[in-house]
Image (cartoon, helix red, strand yellow):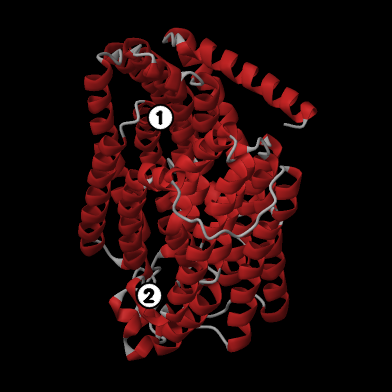
Amino acid sequence: MALGTVFARLTGYLRSILLVATLGNALHADLFAIANTIPNMLVVLLGAGIFNAVLVPQVVKADRSGDGASYVNEVITLFGGFLLVATVLITVAAPGLTRLFLAPQLADQQFAGQYHSAIALAYLCLPQIFFYGMFALIGQILSARGAFGPMMWAPVLNNVVSIAVLAAYLSAYGSVADGCGGYAGGQERLLGVGMTAGVIVQCLALVPYLKRAGIHFRPTADLMSDRMRATIRLGAWTVAVVLVNQLAYGVIVRLASGGAASVSSCTGGAPDGGTGFTVYSSANLLIMAPHAIITVSLMTAHLPGLATLASTGRLGELGRRLSSSLRLVMVAMMPGIALIELLSVAISNLVWGYGAGASTYERFSPTVSCFGVALFFFTAHYVALRGLYALEATRVIFGIQTVIAVVNVGAAILLVHLTDRATTAPALASAFALAYAVGSFISWQVLRRMVGTIELRRILTTLASVGGCTALATVGCLALNYAVSGDLVARPTTKVGSMATVTATAVAFSALLFLSGRVIRVAEASDLRAVFAARGHHSARDEVEGK
């Protein structure tokens, strides 16, 4: 299971890299990226949020009470039918729906070709909604029966198909020469049908495992049993949280789509280096890798008993456990974030400096840096959120997420208005950082009131200690960069130079961090090593046992 998740992420990153190499990082790429993102946004609203939040425990309860088979039939029939009808209606409404996610200027006559390409791609991508939804539904049912692996591995198949489609596109049409233009009919069909085929393969890959898990689906007319009503009721606040998040993200997509939509640069004028949705979403995907590797892994290993502590009323212990988790996570995350800031240009070159992105990879660097700052606050909020979910404080979570969404949208609109097109994506990433700075502050204050103590002094002491060590290592690396290149930030232009920069900086930073850590003692450092050692042992054992 763990290996499947790793391969899914690695192939997902490869897909992102190939997408930029093939389509570039300007308006041309944004048109496809937005059309291919809309189904992901809508499927969460149409039920995937409920599936992920409440379906597994409901299936487990149904199995224990002896009516598991009828409940599964009811779930698949009801939600499958709803997803099918909704997908058909949404696909028919593709032109109006697509316009909601595009900046107003893209409806102007100067962008008529691009606008029509966006709609054509949306028609071909929107059927993904049904298959994404069924994948989430079947995957959660399998998880409830103890079959976790298929849902972890199936996205690899989707990514492999997507990579093959992009490779075929690259072979047939080459890297994009005009970063502003629309698509020809054949290009639209290859991308749209190909990406949708990947989602279909991902969904169908789960079907054979239903029988192995003892599930024999039969459509049923009994669609609103007491258990189904309880499922919908339990998922109501989850849907509300998802709705707020997706509405905010829809505004961000619309703002981002205008970043690369410059009349001047798209009609023969001088290019203005506009950054839009492709830059924003690709940088966000990359920056979430440390979160997945460090934060999620540590939380999984360190907080298995949160729900138990909450349900038994041991709130003080719950607060101390969360405090310890935050301190451990930040011991790893803060140095990682500093390295991201130091190496943003070199990382951008290594990740996106190929094909159509070979000469424009530096457009990613400011956005990566801004998301690096955001990662600190996002991580703090994530840890607090685990505690709030353990306390089943869904209404409180909804309120906090609403504040985050409002701040994100408000700051994004303001910052995009105050900056030029070249800084659209960094402005949106900065708004994201500000929103989660506010959200993390609120979530920890609320958590402290609910559990009584979060050991704030210990948290601040750890942050100050780790921050001091990280600052000393960062200053040392900046001085080293200046001594070697005359610039505080290394800006290698070749792949060999970028790799050498990443390696040398990582080694120097680690050495300086170690030396500063000998002076500024960080008690949690040894605990962190122990947790990762235990996590690695358990992961290896699980792989051997086939879990």
Q: Is residue 55 above or below residue 388?
A: below
Would you identify the image quadrant in which residue 23 lies?
bottom right
411 with respect to 511 (left or right): left
Marking on residue 177: none
Q: Position of residue 293 (x, y in %)?
A: 56, 34
Residue in front for this viewpoint, 354 or 148: 148
Residues at circles 1 and 2 in contact by the CB criterion of under 8 Å? no
Residue at far bottom of view: 109
- Residue 79, given in percent of the width and then of the height, sits at 50, 58
As measured in the structure, the alpha-carbon distance from the residue carrying label 1 to the one carrying label 2 is 34 Å
Kind of residue sitting beneath label 1: Arg
Q: Give the crowd class for mark 1: few <14, some 14-19, many >=20 residues within 10 Å.
A: some
Q: Is residue 6 above or below residue 359?
A: above
Determine whether 18 is above or below 523 in the image: below
Residue placed at 47% from the left, 60% from the top?
43
| Outermost right residue | 544
Q: Secondary structure at mark 2?
A: helix
Q: Amino acid at mark 2?
A: Leu
Residue positioned 55% across, 29% down in the render: 297
Query: Considering only order in the chain, which callout, 2 or 1, is on the residue closer to the N terminus?
Result: 2
Q: Residues within 10 Å of mark 2 (few under 14, many from 20)?
A: some
Q: Which residue occupies the foreground of this view, 6 or 113?
A: 6
* Residue corresponding to mark 1: 386
Q: Position of residue 308 (x, y in %)?
A: 44, 18
Residue at 60% across, 28% down: 507
* Quadrant, the N terminus: top right
Per the image, the residue denoted by label 2 is 97
